[in-house]
Amino acid sequence: MEIRQTVVAMFAVAVLSSSAVALAQPAPIDKAYESSKSAELESVKLQLATSSSPTALAELNEAESALRHLRETKAPDQRRKIAAELESALIRLRLEANNTSLKR
């Protein structure tokens, strides 16, 4: 059990550090960004297709909601804020998906 927790913790650190660097980059939050995050979300959905974790479902709903708000929002400052929320939701969703797959 300790090995699984260590692996999950190491993965979390790797994901968080890489996304912190990505968020620090002044990349435009445009249609291409929306498309890449949508594809990332679909990828995690496939990974979660066989699990029924309530936590994963809540994280999935939050990520989908953030992506929907990002698509609806036009103001650049608001889009950057929503993009950060989307990144956080996707990170938590990936962590939950990996944690769920480790339990199998």
Image (cartoon, rainbow, N blue to C red):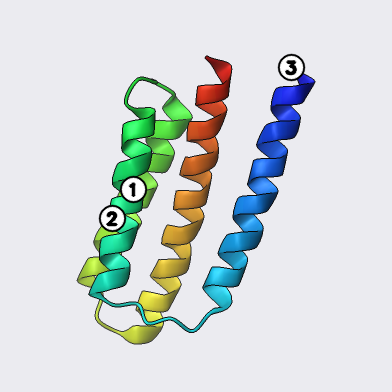
Q: Residue at position x 52%, y 45% from top?
A: 92
Where is mark 3, residue-wise? 1
In the image, residue 77 lies at what x, y percent? Answer: 40, 84
Q: Residues within 10 Å of mark 2 (few under 14, many from 20)?
A: some
Q: Is residue 54 above or below residue 16?
A: above
Q: Residue at position x 55%, y 39% from top?
A: 95
Mark 3 lies on a secondary structure that is loop
Mark 2 lies on a secondary structure that is helix
Q: Amino acid at mark 1?
A: Leu
| First along the sequence among labels 1 and 3 | 3
Q: Residue at position x 50%, y 24% from top?
A: 101
In the image, residue 71 lies at what x, y percent? Answer: 23, 68
Name the mark on residue 41.
1
Q: Residues within 10 Å of mark 3 (few under 14, many from 20)?
A: few
Where is mark 2, residue-wise? 38
3 with respect to 68 (left or right)? right
Q: Amino acid at mark 2?
A: Ser
Distance from the alpha carbon under mark 2 to that under mark 1: 5 Å
Q: Quadrant of the N terminus?
A: top right
In the image, residue 61 lies at what x, y percent? Answer: 34, 43
Name the mark on residue 55.
none
